[in-house]
Amino acid sequence: MNRLANSLSPYLLQHKNNPVDWYPWGEEAFELAVREDKPIFLSVGYAACHWCHVMEHESFEDDAIAALLNQHFVSIKVDREERPDIDQVYMNALQVMTGRGGWPMSVFLDHQRQPFFAGTYWPPKQKFAMPGFSQVLESLSEAWANRREEVLGHSDQITAALQQLATGTEGQSDPISAVESPSSELVLSACARLLEVLDHKWGGFGGAPKFPHATDLSLLLRMGQAIDDQSMVAAAELTLDRMAAGGIRDHIGGGFSRYSVDEQWLVPHFEKMLYDNALLAEVYVRAFQVTGHVRHAEVARETLDYVCRELVDTAGGFHCSEDADSEGVEGKYYVWNPEQVEQVLGKEAARDFCTVYDISDTGNFEGKSIPNLPQSISAWAEEMSVDEGELAAVLAGYREQLRVAREHRVHPGRDDKVITAWNALMIKALSVAGAVLNQPTYLKAAEDAADFLLKDMTRDDGRLLHAFRGGKAHLDAYVDDYAFTIEAFIALFEATGRARWIKRAIKLADSMIQHFEDREVGGFFYTADDAEVLIARNKDWHDGSLVSGNASAASGLLKLSLLCDRQDFRDIAERTLLAGTVVMQQQSSACAALLAVLDHLHDGNQQLALAVADNIELARIRPDFFAAYRPRAVLSWVVGQAPESGPTVALNQERVAIDGEPTLYRCENFTCDQPIRNRELKQWLDDNRLS
């Protein structure tokens, strides 16, 4: 075993028996590099990454390549999910040097930890136009030995570029000096550009490979609902329907894979990530609110049921991911042939199921079939001359039988870390779905996970930790851990009316501001003021697989300002948007979440407080209150005649259920209407159900 054997990360532990003399990121490795005058080979990946596994088996398990690495380099292995700060810095380096990114990420560093060469996957020997990894190692070893000055000069140049890129606000030296926030026209322009690049046949934006782009879909639903633009809603719905029909969705067990390698969403990269499923579940719930189409709610339920069934940690919280591979073969767990289906369902049922879900002898993926829906259940019902509801129920029963049978296969590997930020995304999704779909089990799952974050992921001083595994929490949290958790706790409060979630959100917001805010320029750094110093201190403006940290921070602060009358929170949210002006102006295709906050700043001053007699009344009326999507409003509950939320939630002060009956208080742009109740309240809820 090498030095990774003591790691908590499943990804690092996968490499503990490699002949490569791996080190974890830390001073021991860097001191050795200086002492032995060797460059550093930094390899970054994650447990569910298929090509990370390929490179390990081909190169890191190869004795000859390991000997090259051990002789000429100090090798460091990093789990990008444990150390996203390191991943961000050197991913920027990779993109600067090669114009592309991805994992496994392979970066070569000098003794100042500055990068001088980078790539992703290399085969062990030259293949097609790709150099072999052994050739790369030999060439770089020669350059380090004989052309050191050239190498160090290059690393200095790359590092200077990284430091310029770090804040994401190049060209805008002092954003706070701007007179006012960016125009809301930026939001509509960004939506228009999304419609321009929409694939009108298969949905999604651009060609293959296709990623879900949950934040873009969320922005289209938000603005389509807010300004009643059906073209935006239709674009989002087309994409959601195509994804739900494709193989990127696991039709047997629920949940979505990371991305599709083709434009039709048919062949996924089979790994399943917690964050994708959290973000997509919420988007499907929002689509149901906007359109009333029950199919979107069903996709959300199946996705959340998958997470709650498969990814719950025994200590609480949710695991990170499931691999693409099982038994060393990508997708083996998920594919079928007609004979396998017949063994479970019987001949007649299997014939119908295989017809509907595109399972054939020839297959659609390496001789096997990925279940998908070439046409909708509705279309199949019409073609088969059967009732759609009955067909859907029968197929659901068949899918469950196949899921149970699939459990006997060798499961894909699982990364059973618990990451605070990713759990917060799932808590938010469960909170929204629990309220909208009237599903108390989702609300309980959300509160259980939130309690876990408070108990196990919080230090004695109230600050958050980032990762947990095997009963141990470690690594100080990053800004998205704070921001996503703040938003999750707000969503829990909006769904349950329990003021403790707002109290905790406020404490986290104060801590986030203290340790992450850039008070000179605006916005939030990704790392805290007392974190390890890397070669660049990034600000996270762009949506990637996750929501940008700055977008989420600004969103949470803006909502808290409206709920709790905290002008300081609003001011900091506005400064964050000012600092992100250049990003929104020049890179709108990569910052949908930030643009959604900009819309909320300009037009989101609606506050709705619904006063009810008790929690029984709250549970009864909640489905009606959440039937409509109100993206520009904050929602609050006042429970009882002496509500506990009053001191914390300023919006609730002096609000009561008049005569013990549900009473709605509406305020907008600092003006409040007369409270409404009785028939007027019922009428208002009905009128606003899909508006």
Image: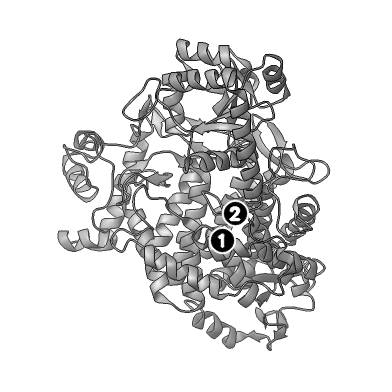
Instruction: Tell me whether circle 2 and circle 1 mark residues in contact (CB < 8 Å).
Output: yes
Q: Residue at x 59, y 49 (%)?
A: 445
Residue marked by disc 2: 548
Residue 585 falls left or right of residue 458? left
Labels 2 and 1: the sequence-earlier one = 2
- Determine the secondary structure under disc 2: loop
Question: Of residues 458 and 476, which is closer to you in this image?
Answer: 476
Number of numbered discs: 2
- Name the image quarter holding the N terminus: top right
x, y percentage for residue 603? 61, 77
Type of amino acid at the residue the image marks with label 1:
Ala
Q: Residue at x 66, y 45 (%)?
A: 163
> On screen, 517 above or below 331?
below
> On screen, 327 above or below 318?
above
x, y percentage for residue 599? 59, 72
Local packing at callout 2 (Cα closer than 10 Å; few below 14, some 14-19, many 20+) is many
- Determine the secondary structure under disc 1: helix
Type of amino acid at the residue the image marks with label 2:
Ser
Q: Residue at x 49, y 63 (%)?
A: 218
Q: Residue at x 29, y 52 (%)?
A: 264
Residue 640 visible to an observer of this rendering: yes
State how the image is colored.
Answer: one colour
Residue 284 falls left or right of residue 584? left
Residue 292 visible to an observer of this rendering: no
Circle number at residue 384: none
Question: Of residues 500 and 368, which is closer to you in this image?
Answer: 368
Residue marked by disc 1: 593
Question: Of residues 660 and 155, which is closer to you in this image?
Answer: 155
